[in-house]
Amino acid sequence: MVNRWTVFTTTFLATLIIPTARGLAPIEALGSKLYDSETGDQFYIRAYRVFDDLDPLSVPAQCDLDAPLMKTLGVNTIRVYEVEYTRSHDACMSSFEQAGIYVIVGLSGGDAIIDGYDPEWTMDMFTHFTKTLDTFAKYDNLLAVTVGNEVIEEGETTTAAPYVKAAIRDTKAYRDGQGYRKIPVGYTSADDDATRLDIQNFLVCGDTIADNADFFGLNRFSWCGNSSFTDSGYSDLYDDAKDYPVPIFFSETGCDEVGEREFDDQEAVLGSEMNDRWSGAIMDTLTPTGTPSSLYTPAYTSVACPSTTISSWSVIPTAPLPTIENLVITTKPAASLGKDSSGTQKAAGPSSPTAVAVTKSKFGSSGLSTGAKAAIGVIVPVVVLGFAIMSFLLWRRRRSATTKPAPDEKGPEYSEVIQEQNSPREGVGEFYKPRESEIGGNPVSQLHGEGVMPELGSEMGFNMGDVGRELVELDAYSPPLELSNGPSVRRPSRDSRRDSRTSTGSQD
């Protein structure tokens, strides 16, 4: 017979050495391009937007259905407009990571939304934004976060631009202070030709890079039907992105007119006409090669801030950005940082805040993905704990077998009891039948007695006779009893007992 501990040990260890799937490498913004932080390959967004009033990343069943289908379509990114930071997003983020899909998350939500017509940037809004960032910063497939979407739609709402930029500035400062990786923080703009270029340039103008957006997204709906690179206005968008210092991509694309969509716009965005300046758009199977990071030297060239105009852009270029009163953004101390195998400094978890800035290098060179490192960190302690538990159980089993006393070691009293219990009983050969005793004044006899402990049952609040019958009925499915003297005996079946009770007039 196979030892059960051998089976347990083999099964336990087999579950631990199953290979762990490689996790996605974080995407980082370098100059005007996006890159895979491990391979150095340029990354182009082939995205699908998920619009839902509720938090779509907190519904695991839906994510499990969507992720494989999106992967089949060639999607590598989804955009989610609003989430609830108090909910769990582990299952959904894992489903999309396994499908090779990154996520762009909107930080605003509820009352924490910058209103273009009545803009403000408050401590409550800052708290909502940073708590949402805290919730998602741990996921390697978090591609970027946005502080607003289409806040500025026309000339009257341009006064909100400084508030958008202030939100970007403070969110980036908080990100760096917490020691998070350089998760890109940016904004997605409305399809409004009167203000688009102004907000596009305003968010990256000036010499204080810490205040500027890490990317710019444009919601565009001008390529309809059999349009073209020129007729759609995409050629103008390409020209406007010349020397733009951060990644720019289409955060929404489509057509405002009713009709069949041909998706020819994606061939332009991801093809040679635009892919040297634009970093992608929505889902498509066309994948440009791009420029490897080893051949690209990012350079941040300051863009001139847009001039003030009465009709379309009312922001004064030299005006300071809004600030939150009493806001103090702290940073993690250098002592809380570890180093990976390449000597690169990295964040090592929460600690008390100080005024020390944290930076992270461009690439690591350990050869292991973040997911693989995490798997090793989990598996090794589990293996050690498993061996410790098995060793203890084996030691306990052997000790029990070797220390069990022989009858003679218990003295004559114990031997007499054993001898009495092993002596033959009348009617059942050597099968043991308990002696009658008195409980509550009633005799208890037979293994499946007639009327088991009625008075004791009544004292406990239920009918022990019914309990006895139920136990006997369950025993009808037991295997035969092998007695040491005499033939095999099977307990009566459920039907035979029911027939017997019926014939004697017994009542349940």
Image: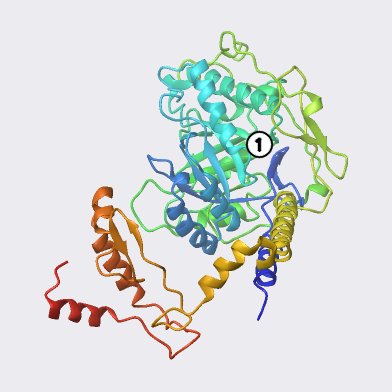
Name the residue nearer the viewer: 264 or 249: 249
**Position of the N terminus by quadrant:** bottom right
Residue 198 visible in the shown view: no
Element marked by disc 1: loop
Q: Position of residue 141 (x, y in %)?
A: 62, 47
Q: Residue furthest bottom?
A: 487
For the point 61% across and 28% down, which residue is it? 201
Left or right of 125? Residue 118 is left
Q: In the rendered view, would you say 333 is above or below 416? A: above
Name the residue nearer the viewer: 326 or 314: 326
Q: Position of residue 178 (x, y in %)?
A: 68, 27
Residue type, numbered disc 1: Ile
Q: How many marks?
A: 1
Q: Position of residue 454 (x, y in %)?
A: 24, 58
Q: In the rendered view, would you say 109 is above or below 54? A: above
Residue tagged 1:
183
Name the residue nearer the viewer: 40 or 347: 347
Q: In the rendered view, would you say 282 is above or below 19? A: above
For the point 60% across and 39% down, which residue is it? 144
